[in-house]
Amino acid sequence: MITLTEENYIKAIYHLSKHGKEMVSTNALADSMNTKASSATDMVKKLADKLYVNYKKYQGAILTETGNEIAIGVIRKHRLWEVFLVDKLQFSWDEVHDIAEQLEHIKSQKLIDKLDAFLGHPTHDPHGDPIPDKNGDFIFIEKIKLSQSQTGEIYSCVGVNDSSSEFLQYLNNNLIELGTKIEVLHKEVFDNSIKIKVNGTIMMVSSSVAHNLYIQKL
Amino acid sequence: MITLTEENYIKAIYHLSKHGKEMVSTNALADSMNTKASSATDMVKKLADKLYVNYKKYQGAILTETGNEIAIGVIRKHRLWEVFLVDKLQFSWDEVHDIAEQLEHIKSQKLIDKLDAFLGHPTHDPHGDPIPDKNGDFIFIEKIKLSQSQTGEIYSCVGVNDSSSEFLQYLNNNLIELGTKIEVLHKEVFDNSIKIKVNGTIMMVSSSVAHNLYIQKL
DNA sequence: AAGTAATTTTAGACTAATCTAAAAATATTT
DNA sequence: AAATATTTTTAGATTAGTCTAAAATTACTT
Ligand SMILES: [Mn+2]
Ligand SMILES: [Mn+2]
Ligand SMILES: [Mn+2]
Ligand SMILES: [Mn+2]
C-alpha cells in the first residue's frame, strides 16, 4: 500500500524530472516538498526499497516504470478533480489547486472512471494542462511561452506554467483566461517585458509573467 | 489541526454514544475502530487533551460541544459525498460507503457548501440517513424497525440500520429500496421472522433483516 | 592539485498511531 | 467479603515522517 506522502513525493519527482526521465536531486525534491534534504533522502531511500525510483547516493533519484505510472495516475486524478471543481461546482481556476491536492489521493479506480465519464472525458484541466487518459497517455499540444513569442503575431492563451493562485488572480484581474487572444506589439530588450493587446486593451507584462503564460500561434 | 484518524475516532464516539451524549468505553471504541483497547485509550487521552472529549479513567469518554460539532461536520460531508456518488456518478447505494469514508476528510468549507448546493441541498443520504445542514441541524423523521411493525399494516422503507454492502446487496437482490412499499402479513413468534409482501411478491425475512430495516407507516 | 564551498547523507531525536504483554481497576460470582 | 473474571490502563516497542546538527562526498576556485 502506497501512502499519501509517498504519492506526493513521487508526483514531485515526476514534475522535477521534466515528465519523468532525468535524475532529481534530494535538495530539489526537499525544496519542492517544503521539507529538509534529510527528509527527502530518507523518503527517496524508501521509494527505492519499494521499487518506485532508482536512487544512487549523491546522484539523485529517477522514477521507475512503476513510479511513473503512479505519478501519472495521481496527476490524472488531480486534473480530473480540478475540472469537476470548476465545471460542476463553479470554482474559479485559482481556487482549485489545494483542494485537488487532497482529492488526488482518494483511492478508487471506479470513482475516477465514473468521474471521468461524468465530466465528458476532458482532455485538459482548467489551467490548460493535459489530462492523462486511462492508459496514461496524454495529448501533447505544442505550445510556447509568451516570452518566446514574435512581435506582430497573434496568439491564443493555452495554459500557465505557474498555477499559483497569485498568478492566476493576476490573470483574472487582467481578463486573461484560456482561449484569450493576445497580440504581441513589442518586446522590450532592456528588461524582457512585453507589450501586448488583450481584449482591446494595451498592457505591459513583465518577463516573469511572460515566462509563465503558455500560448499558441493562431 | 485535527488529523484524519482523530476525525474517525470522534465520529465513532459520536455513533457509539447514540448521537453524542452517553459515555463510550475504550473497548467499544477499539472494537468499532478495529484497533486494540490500548490504542483507543491513547487516542482518547489525546482527544481529551485537545478538548474534543471528556474522559475519566475507567469510565469512558464523551464528546464535548466542540467534539460534537466536529463529528456532525464529518457526518455531513460523508453523507453529502454519498449523495454525489449515487445521484451524479451513478454508483449503487451499496458501493459508496468506503469511498465516502475517504472523501469525508477533505478539508474545504467552500467545497462542501458548493457540493451541497450542487446536489440541491439534500436532506437524506442514499441509505435514508439525515444530512445535517450547515448549522449542524438535521431533520428527524420518526421511523421504526421492521421488527416493530404491526401485522396487516403497510409501510414504506425509509432507511437501513446496517449500511454494509452485504446487507444492501441483499436488499438489491430482493428489490427493496428506499420508498419501497412493504406489507406486513405475519410475524412469526418462534424465530421473529416476518412474512411480507414486496412488489407483489411474498417473502420471509429473518429477524436480523427485520432489525436492520427502517420503515414508516403509510 | 589543494583548499574551500556547496551538496548530500548519516546520526540521533521527536510526534502520531499502532501493537503486545503486564499491571491495575472494576465487575461478577461464590 | 473473598475470589475470580473482565475491563481498562500502562509500559515498552515499532513504523512513518519529520527535524537539527554533524559528517561525508562532490563541485568549484584558486
Ligand atoms: Mn497531494
Ligand atoms: Mn491544474
Ligand atoms: Mn473516514
Ligand atoms: Mn450513508
Image (cartoon, coloured by chain):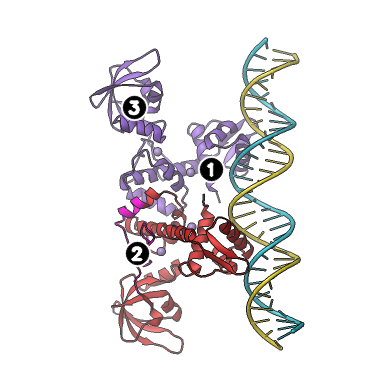
Chain colours: A purple, B red, C yellow, D cyan
Q: What secondary structure is marked by label 1?
A: helix
Q: Do dots 1 and 2 share one subunit?
A: no
Relative side of C28 to A66, left or right: right
The residue at which mark 1 appears reads as: A66
Determine the residue located farthest toward the left in the rendered image.
A200
Which is nearer the N-term, disc 3 or disc 1? 1
Relative side of B1 to B189, left or right: right
Residues tagged 1 and 2 counted as in contact (Cβ below 8 A) = no
Q: Is residue A112 above or below residue A198?
A: below
How many numbered circles are shown? 3
Q: Could you classify mark 3 by the number of other residues whose Cα lies within 10 Å: few (under 14), some (14-19), or many (20 or more)?
A: many
For the residue marked with disc 1, what is the amino acid?
Answer: Thr
Residue B62, disc: none
The residue sitting at 55% across, 48% down in the picture is A3
Residues under labels 1 and 2: Cα distance? 42 Å
Q: Quadrant of ligand 4?
A: bottom left
Boundaries of the magenta span: B113-142
* Chain ID at mark 2: B
For the residue marked with disc 3, what is the amino acid?
Answer: Ile
Q: Position of residue B84 (x, y in %)?
A: 35, 56
Q: Is residue A147 above or below residue A71?
A: above
The residue at which mark 3 appears reads as: A215
- Per the picture, the main secondary structure of the magenta-coloured stretch is loop
Q: Is residue A65 visible?
A: no
Q: Nearer the viewer, residue B69 or A214?
A: B69
Residues tagged 3 and 1 counted as in contact (Cβ below 8 A) = no
Q: Is the distance from the Cβ of mark 3 to the nearest ligand 2 atom less than 8 Å? A: no
